[in-house]
Amino acid sequence: GQNIDQPTEMTATEGAIVQINCTYQTSGFNGLFWYQQHAGEAPTFLSYNVLDGLEEKGRFSSFLSRSKGYSYLLLKELQMKDSASYLCASMDSNYQLIWGAGTKLIIKP
Amino acid sequence: GAVVSQHPSRVICKSGTSVKIECRSLDFQATTMFWYRQFPKQSLMLMATSNEGSKATYEQGVEKDKFLINHASLTLSTLTVTSAHPEDSSFYICSARDSYSGQGDSYEQYFGPGTRLTVT
């Protein structure tokens, strides 16, 4: 079956670094997406990985290991506005996104 | 670029009535649009995949006669919730994929702002 696992909730301190992990099992693989979703709003795109390795984009970086079915999103220099849910989604062989349940990130001052 | 609009953003309707939600890709053409539903504190649940000019593909457990989808053009898809009931109250979100991109990350889905439906 298809399955995406990520922690339900994480807490971090403003200015710190946090890593949100995601493991996936999908029928075929065409890339791994990370989206940010603030409460009551639609998701916004953060990153896409299809090759192994780390992709850095400002304060956010995303890592992929295809052999391990594993990805993480790394957020540096956390700001209060980073408090949101972070959704991991794997694209299967039909180019359909399989979504994780999301990780609610709480940033404390 | 890659903007998706959704209308209305918020709607309250009475039980038994029908509600239509529009999803438009404003600056690109979208052969494929997706309709999601999200209940509070839960992840996105794909309801159906809408393909321009053909019938939508519904996910298991989603009633196609209750959630009517029409994708009549490359920039517009509509979702009609027929005979709405309070349990249909939810956040409905559409997304669209650019038809003409060929690279992997072009399979990114661009999301509309969502429609919050409340059925009383």
Image (cartoon, rainbow, N blue to C red):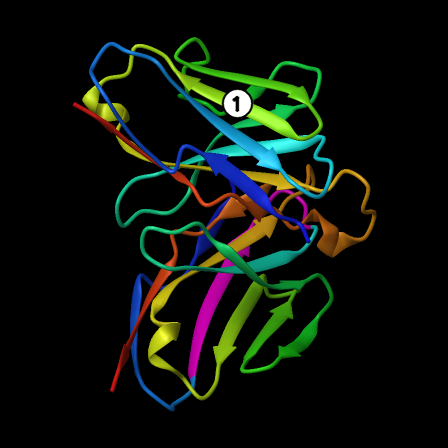
Query: Percent from the top left, x then y, of residue B27?
Result: 70, 43
Chain designation of label 1: B
Quick one: A64 or B55, which is closer to the camera? B55
Give the extent of the magenta segment.
A18-29
Classed neighbour count for the residue bearing mark 1: other residues with Cα under 10 Å, few (<14), some (14–19), many (≥20): many
Corner quadrant of residue B30 = top right
- Is residue B112 part of the magenta span, yes or no? no
- Residue A29 lies left or right of residue A103; in this view the side is right
Magenta stretch secondary structure, dominant: strand
Query: Percent from the top left, x then y, of residue B5?
Result: 53, 40
Corner quadrant of residue B88 = top left
Above/below status of A23 relative to A92: below
Quadrant, the C terminus of chain B: top left
Above/below status of A50 relative to B35: below
**Residue identifier under label 1:** B78
- Residue A100 lies left or right of residue B91; in this view the side is right
Quick one: B118 or A11, which is closer to the camera? B118
